[in-house]
Structure formats: structure tokens, C-alpha cells
Image: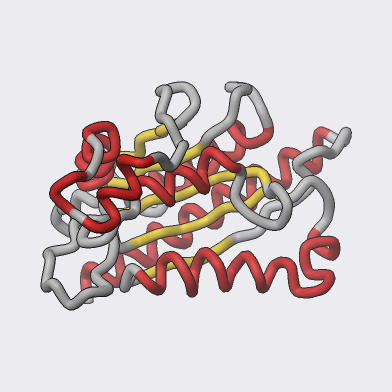
Amino acid sequence: MTNQQQLRAVVVTSHPDADSATARTARAVARGLLRGGFTEVEHHDLLAEGFDPTFGSGDHTAYRDRSAVPEDVRAEQRRLEAFDAIAVVFPVYWWGLPGPLKGWVDRVFTRDWAYDDTGSGAELAAPKRLYFFPIGAVGESTYRKHGYLDGMRAQLVDGLAGYMGAVDSDLFLLVDGESDVPEQHLARERAAEDAGAAVAERAHGREAA
């Protein structure tokens, strides 16, 4: 981990279109993180870099034997260890993460790296600031209906980040990802940048404390 003047963040996506609403929103989040005080922000697209999200027999073995973590997973973990914060930007698929991102979590956020549920006392190396930026296809009311937005927050902020013992985590719903109105896309990108700046300022405040 780096010191409080040199916080680094990685923006993680998994999208086949480099000029999609997701990609543009990810760039806006990155701008906000830099504006808020992170000294370096890297973009990491899992599809572009060929990460395999399929949870296989090797991953199942690693669940029981920490020393057997597959090398591609370990390489991904080492990459993430260089950062103080992870920002995940994604289009909402069925009220949650798209498959490649869910598989990335399943494979990479392993026992004794992301969490300790056995009392092993392992030093957990995963970054402890996790921020989620889901992009809804339409307006916010659809994602509040029946508690869908609360469900995403419970799964990602309380469930994933909370189980990892994160020092800070949050979720920022961004909307109108499939709008035909250019101004709505610009509004979403402005909101994404502002949210990125807010969490960066918060991270620096926590470091200073």
C-alpha cells in the first residue's frame, strides 16, 4: 500500500465496446478520482485483457487450499495489491453484476486474500476501499422499485465489501445508460465524475485521520 499522499486507484470494467456508455462512464469516474486527490488511476478492462472469469476445478481446490490458487488468479491479486482502492463500473444486468465481473469476484476475492473466515490470522492483502458504480439503462425509479437498488447495495457494499472488512465502501447508481438523448449521457458522466471525486476526498480524509 502507498502512503496518504500517493493513493492509487484502479477502475475495473468488463465490456466489449471501448466507446460504450460503460467505458465513457468509467473514464468520468477516473477523472473524478484524480480530481479528488488520487495520484494515479489505472483502467483495467477484464475482457480486453483476457481474464477468464470461469470458476473451475482449480478455483474449487484453492477454496480449500490457499497454496493452490491458480496462477492467473494470483497474478490478478498481485496487480490489485498495488492499489489502495477499487472502483467497479458496470451496466446493471438482472439487478447485479454482469457475468464476467461476477466471475472475477468469485475467482479473485479468495479466502486469506480478501477475507478470513477460518481464523487463520492471514494478512489480507486485498485493497480495503471498494466503490461500485452501476449504470442503469433507464431512470432511477426503476431501480428503486421493489427494493432492487437496496438489494444491490446489500449484496455489494454490505455483503462483499463488508465481509472483507473494508474501511470504506459505497455504491452510486448512475442512470440513462441506454438513452437516445446526448444530454442525459453527459449528465450521467458529470454525476460519475462528482461521485469519483467524493470518494477520493473521503479516502484521503480517512488516511489523514
Of 93 and 65, the residue lying toward us: 65
Residue drawn at the location 35% of the way across and 35% of the way down: 42
Residue at x-position 49% and y-position 53%: 196
Residue 94 position within the rendered picture, expressed as x and y whole percent measured from the top left: 73, 52
User: Observer-nearest residue: 171 or 201?
Assistant: 171
Q: Quadrant of residue 79?
A: top left
Q: Nearer the viewer, residue 196 or 171?
A: 171
Q: Is 163 left, or right, of 48 in this rendering?
A: left
Asked if residue 178 is positioned above or below residue 168 in the image, the reply reads above
180, above or below 101, in the image? above
Horizontally, is 152 left or right of 183 in the view? left
Q: How many marks?
A: 0
Q: Which residue is found at the position 45% from the left and 37% from the top?
A: 53
Q: Reply above or below: 160 against 135.
A: below
Describe the colour scheme in one phrase: secondary structure
Residue 167 pos. (x, y %) = 32, 72
Judge left or right: residue 99 versus residue 105.
Answer: right
Q: Horizontal and vertical percent for residue 60?
A: 34, 49
Residue drawn at point x = 52 percent, y = 48 percent:
102
Which quarter of the rendered picture does the C terminus lie within?
Answer: bottom left
Give the x, y percent position of residue 164.
33, 68
